[in-house]
Amino acid sequence: MLEVSVNLALFKVLPMVVRIRQQELSYRQELLTLGLKMSERLPLPEASGKRRKSRPARDEEGDYECEICRANLFVSLVTNSHEEGVYCLPHAIQLLTNKRHHLKYCKLMYTYDEINQFLPMITPTIRALTPATPPEYSERTCTSLGNQVFTTP
């Protein structure tokens, strides 16, 4: 019974994951349009107690946090070496829209560069684990973003 409820929960969060992915790709595209060209992949969080050289704007637990809204940043962030700040993508867009000269100091940092492939990889798994499609999710439409096709509510 627990397995069924876990699978159903996974199925129900799928639309949220789709929305987060679409928003992430949209923000990254907007930053690129603004002229942000530098990027770097962050190391994935380590499971063990080992800690690497710390980066600015990490709290005690090692998580990145936006300087403006204090949101925890797990997927991506923008660093500004001039102000030694870390920003969520919406606040980075706001900053770079108002202060274009900061572009040379900013860098997109991300944990997952395979964000385009992420959703198509997990969707079949979630569907396979879900025994029956709940009625509220039975009618689905196909959406294409980039060259990846995935299902949305």
Image (spheres, rainbow, N blue to C red):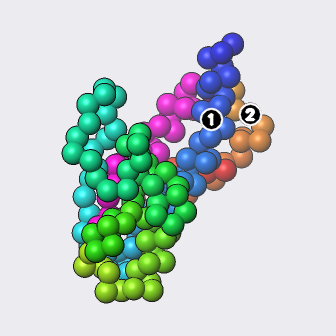
Residue 19 point in image, percent of width and height: 58, 55
Residue drawn at (45%, 75%), measured in percent from left and top?
93
Nearest to N terminus: mark 2 or mark 1:
1
Residue 10 against residue 129 in the figure, above or below: below
Residue 64 against residue 48 in the figure, above or below: below
The N terminus, quarter of image? top right
Residue drawn at (32%, 81%), measured in percent from left and top?
102
Residue 63 point in image, percent of width and height: 41, 46
Q: Which of these two is toward me, 130 or 20? A: 20
Q: Residue extending furthest front?
A: 60
Q: Quadrant of residue 34?
A: bottom left
Q: Main secondary structure of the magenta part?
A: helix
Residue 99 is left or right of residue 131, and the answer is: left
Residue drawn at (55%, 27%), measured in percent from left and top?
128
Residue 84 is left or right of residue 127, and the answer is: left
The answer to whether marks 2 and 1 mark residues whose Cβ atoms lie closer than 8 Å is: yes
> Could you say which disc has been placed on residue 134 in the image?
2
Residue 54 point in image, percent of width and height: 27, 47
* Range covered by the magenta-colored residues: 107-130
Residue 60 is left or right of residue 2, and the answer is: left
Count of labels in the image: 2
Q: Which of these two is toward me, 5 or 145? A: 5
Residues at marks 2 and 1, CA–CA distance in whole angstroms: 9 Å
Q: Which residue lies under the disc numbered 1?
A: 11
Residue drawn at (33%, 73%), measured in percent from left and top?
83
- Disc 2, SS: loop
- Disc 1, SS: helix
Residue 12 is left or right of residue 150, and the answer is: right
Q: Quadrant of residue 76?
A: bottom left
Q: Amino acid at mark 2?
A: Pro
Q: Amino acid at mark 1?
A: Phe
Residue 78 point in image, percent of width and height: 36, 65
